[in-house]
């Protein structure tokens, strides 16, 4: 059974076709990268999978059950969690309180939620920031905090939307190691990324979007050599 199956996914915003009949599959235990130029439809795709948007056409099946059209909180309960391209922490809450929001999906008592949240803060090297307001954290710390909150919901599939964006080289390398650790713990990952150093290093396969359509997919080595990908990123005259 395919872990996640996206079939002919289409999302329109008035006259704008943001996702145009996109089809792909994800195997359990895989790291799938999703790349493409700005405006390719990558975040819209994540919003459809996670329940932020309802697709106009097509289907999304997770672990054998159709989830397209469900509310975001129901999809999260099914085992899909996500981060956001623009970090969505609760700025007036502490690091600990932010992660506890995620733990309350599984744990109903304050003591259980707090204990579990601390575990994820330690896992993301954020324990020393547990009492700091999230709005006062650095961008790198806020991104890690968002990952910790997503993990606190105990997902089977984690959607990472440009977690390396805006980070310096050392922060990117640290992030890559954290993603590897998360994957090694048994979580399947789909990651949207513009930082090629991050996605090409750890992805098993890459799906490439352009203009709302999937133009190719394959291993990182196959994708970077594909003329369609070169054209999408660099234009018609690049090869010449």
Image (spheres, rainbow, N blue to C red):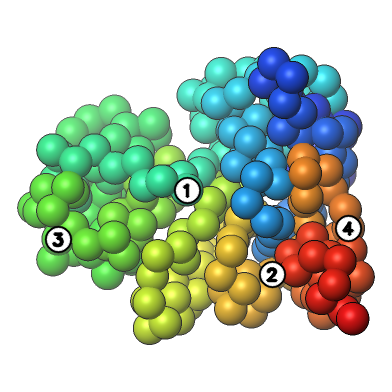
Residue annotated with mark 2: 203
Label disc, if present, on residue 85 of the rendered structure: 1
Residue 77 shown left or right of residue 49 in the figure? left
For marks 2 and 1, give the CA distance.
19 Å
Residue annotated with mark 4: 216
Report the residue at 71% width, 57% height from top: 36
Report the residue at 41% width, 46% height from top: 86
For marks 3 and 2, give the CA distance.
30 Å
Assess disc 1: are there few (<14), some (14-19) or many (≥20) residues with their C-alpha within 10 Å of its C-alpha.
some
Quarter of the figure with residue 61: top right
Q: Measured along the vertical axis of the image, is residue 198 above or below residue 33?
A: below
**Chain-order first, disc 2 or disc 1:** 1
Q: Measured along the vertical axis of the image, is residue 89 above or below residue 19?
A: below
**Chain-order first, disc 4 or disc 1:** 1
Residue annotated with mark 3: 129
Residue 151 shown left or right of residue 224 in the figure? left
Assess disc 3: are there few (<14), some (14-19) or many (≥20) residues with their C-alpha within 10 Å of its C-alpha.
some
From the viewer's side, name the closer residue of 24 and 17: 17
For marks 4 and 3, give the CA distance.
41 Å
Q: Nearer the observer, disc 3 or disc 1?
A: 1
Check disc 2 and report its element: helix, strand or loop: loop
């Amino acid at each position: 059974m395919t872990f996640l199956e996206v079939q002919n996914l289409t999302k329109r915003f008035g006259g704008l076709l943001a996702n145009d009949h996109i089809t792909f599959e994800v195997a359990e235990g895989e790291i799938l990268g999703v790349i493409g130029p700005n405006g390719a439809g990558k975040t819209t795709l994540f919003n459809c999978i996670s329940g932020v948007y309802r697709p106009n056409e097509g289907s999304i099946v997770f672990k054998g059950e159709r989830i397209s059209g469900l509310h975001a909180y129901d999809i999260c309960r099914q085992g899909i969690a996500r981060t956001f391209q623009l970090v969505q922490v609760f700025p007036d809450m502490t690091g600990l309180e932010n992660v506890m929001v995620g733990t309350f999906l599984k744990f109903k008592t304050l003591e259980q939620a707090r204990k579990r949240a601390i575990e994820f803060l330690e896992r993301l090297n954020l324990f020393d920031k547990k009492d700091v307001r999230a709005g006062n954290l650095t961008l790198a710390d806020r991104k890690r905090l968002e990952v910790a909150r997503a993990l606190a919901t105990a997902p089977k599939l984690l959607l990472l939307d440009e977690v390396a964006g805006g980070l310096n080289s050392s922060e990117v390398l640290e992030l890559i190691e954290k993603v590897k650790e998360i994957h090694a713990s048994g979580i399947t990952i789909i990651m949207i990324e513009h930082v090629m150093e991050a996605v090409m290093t750890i992805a098993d396969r890459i799906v490439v979007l352009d203009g709302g359509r999937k133009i190719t997919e394959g291993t990182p080595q196959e994708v970077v050599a594909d003329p369609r990908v070169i054209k999408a990123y660099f234009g018609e005259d690049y090869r010449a």
